[in-house]
Amino acid sequence: MKRMLVLNIVLVSFFIVSCVSSKKQDEPDKHIYMWFDCEANYERLSYPDSIKYYLKKVKDIGVTDVVVDVKSIMGETLYDSDIASFMGEWHGVKRNRDYDMINLFIKEGKKIGLGVHASMNVFSGGHNFYNRGIIYGEHSDWQSINYWCDSIVPISEMKWHYNGMLNPALPEVQDYQLSIIEELVRKYPKLDGLILDRVRYDGITSDFSDFSRKAFEAYAGIKVENFPADILFWEKNDEGNYEWKRGKLFNKWIEWRTSIIYHFFEKARTVTKSANPDILFGTYTGAWYPVYYELGVNWASKKYDPSIDYDWATENYKNYGYAELLDLYMTGLYFYEVTIEEVEKLNEVSAEKRGEAAMGKGKDYWYSVEGSAQLANKVIKDVVPVTGSLYVEQYEKNSEQFSKAVQMAYQSTDGLMIFDIVHIINKDWWEVLEKALSKAKQEN
């Protein structure tokens, strides 16, 4: 009897060890994502053989997952939607509505063991360089109204600014975007994840529409006496250039805008999980948290209180941290300097050039891949995995600096995202990336 008991214990232990070993073999320690931008790769992704080729290419160098844009900054979708306009042409290249790019990614990606995630530009509605998008058509009344220098103007008139953003506070804008999210997730149940991009305001200058003023007044329980000056105003500096300044209600305004984005994320998660409980719900933002409030976004955990560290944050600001709503978070470590030491050396050189103490400040530690990763981990508080993301074009021709950034991002966070494949292709950095990934895994 005792021998049987011992044998059973050994068998159970062997089974557990086998399962753990199998899991380690099947699942990567850290996921490595390659992003496919819909505009930059439009022609490239218009052919099934090309999609198959590049999926195999990224798989061979160590990538575990791909992220493919399915909704452009113009508000057009890359699939046949019943709600949004179809992006059937870009720079003279045309696609039929029955060309199912997403299904091709899923089908071919799954064959070779790649995770496939869809990304959507949410509160974007136009490309101002091409006068194209939903803000130039049926939804011109949804566009962001920006307070720029001495004027309040629709964003479609700001022709130096390519991204025609929407006003996130408008209920009809939110409902529209939520309906597209639900449609996509139901239409493609085999997607591994959904990454929401541009879930934000255009910047500190938006949105100053009459709707936003009234919505803010209702939220704050006050009447704004001087709008927009009580929120924000512009002054000319000694060089004659406009600079924005904070009004007396600025911090409360920042809090309100952040509440708008937070509550949208609540709705978006509910809609996504109702359509497919198994899909990963995620987002991308920049890593520069100390200034990200300008976009109306608090991507931190509720456990982190920014009012302790920053004078722009109210005590209530922490309540709108949305990290707990995510399954996947990608943060843009978009800096040329890789280490904190590099930033410190840069500041030393800048200080020598400035000569006088009042001639300007140096860069903070987070102006580096290492520093911004540290900051992201600090404010996320381990409530969701942090995927460090790199913008390849930022490294220009310096493949060595890019390699260092890959290793730092991989080792400092829970994963790695490369934006975008077009830059790897144009620079022919396949071998550079493969070697950097290999080294990062070895040293991790």
Image: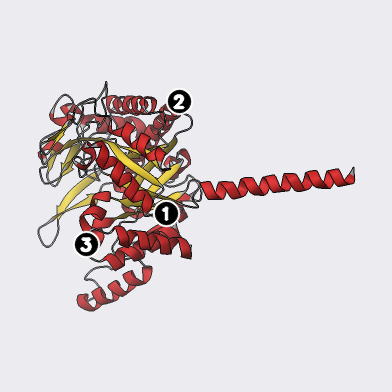
Q: Quadrant of the N terminus?
A: top right
Q: Is residue 396 above or below residue 342?
A: above
Tally of numbered discs: 3
Secondary-structure class at tag 3: loop
Query: Residue 87 falls in which quadrant of the image?
Result: top left
Q: Give x and y (percent) for residue 383.
A: 50, 46
User: Residue 135's x, y, as percent?
Assistant: 16, 31
**Numbered disc 2: secondary structure:** helix
Q: Residue furthest top?
A: 82
Q: Identify which amino acid the numbered label 3 is placed on.
A: Glu
Secondary structure at numbered mark 1: helix
Q: CA distance from mark 3 to mark 2?
A: 43 Å
How many neighbours does mark 2 have within 10 angstroms: few (below 14), some (14-19), or many (20 or more)? some
Q: What's the amino acid at mark 2?
A: Ser
Q: CA distance from mark 2 to mark 1?
A: 29 Å
Residue located beneath label 3 in the image: 396
Q: Nearer the viewer, mark 1 or mark 3?
A: 3
Q: Position of residue 376 (x, y in %)?
A: 42, 54
Mark-to-mark CA distance, 1 and 3: 25 Å
Mark 2 or mark 1: name the one nearer the start of the chain. Answer: 2
